[in-house]
Image: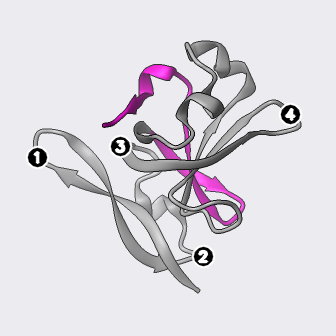
Amino acid sequence: MVHKRFSPVPVAGIGWMAAAVSVHRRQSTSAMGSNKNVILVGKVVSGRVSRAGNVLLNLDKQYPHEIFSVFIKKEDLINFGFDSVSFLKGKRIAVTGKVGDLGDKPVMYVGNGKDVEVLK
């Protein structure tokens, strides 16, 4: 199954920027530069707090068809000056962090509110 994913590409003067590309769902995120910080831009369409207290924000499409998710650990929520689910829902954001996998879906792990910028 092919769907849109984000893959980091070098951008002069900025570093790595995430860009949408079509790839096979089972492609490893190691091919997407999981050891490097990337910038991901998308609209937060849904979010939730898990039973363990972690936050998952879905970008551009709602679960279970999300293109990309942002993951915030429970212990890192103190580093955010806002309620990440209610404040960011419906907003277009740029997020800086490392890309990994959560099951078979790509996810960006974020540990600080400074890594999330609300765009106009």
Establish if 86 lies above or below 93: above
Q: Where's the N terminus, which quadrant?
A: bottom right
> Is the Cβ of the residue at disc 1 closer than 8 Å to that at disc 3?
no
How far separated are the C-alphas under marks 4 and 1? 40 Å
Q: Residue at x 42, y 50 (%)?
A: 42
Q: Residue at x 81, y 30 (%)?
A: 53
Q: Say whether disc 1 or disc 3 marks the residue closer to the N-terminus.
A: 1
Magenta-drawn stretch contains 89: no
Q: Residue at x 36, y 71 (%)?
A: 21
How far separated are the C-alphas under marks 3 and 4? 27 Å
Does 29 sit left or right of 48 as displayed?
A: left
Establish if 76 lies above or below 32: above
Q: What residue did someone put label 1 on?
A: 12
The location of residue 110, given as percent across then percent down, is 54, 33
Magenta range is 97-120
How far separated are the C-alphas under marks 4 and 2? 26 Å
Does 88 sit left or right of 73 as displayed?
A: left
Q: Say whether disc 3 or disc 2 marks the residue closer to the N-terminus.
A: 2
Which residue is at the far right? 51
Q: Residue at x 42, y 61 (%)?
A: 6
Q: Say whether disc 4 or disc 1 marks the residue closer to the N-terminus.
A: 1
The location of residue 117, given as percent across then percent down, is 38, 30
Q: What residue did someone put label 3 on?
A: 39
Q: 10 Å neighbourhood of mark 2: few (<14), some, or many (≥20)?
A: few
Residue 26's tag is 2
Q: What residue did someone put label 4 on?
A: 52
Kind of residue at badge 2: Arg
Q: Say whether disc 2 or disc 1 marks the residue closer to the N-terminus.
A: 1
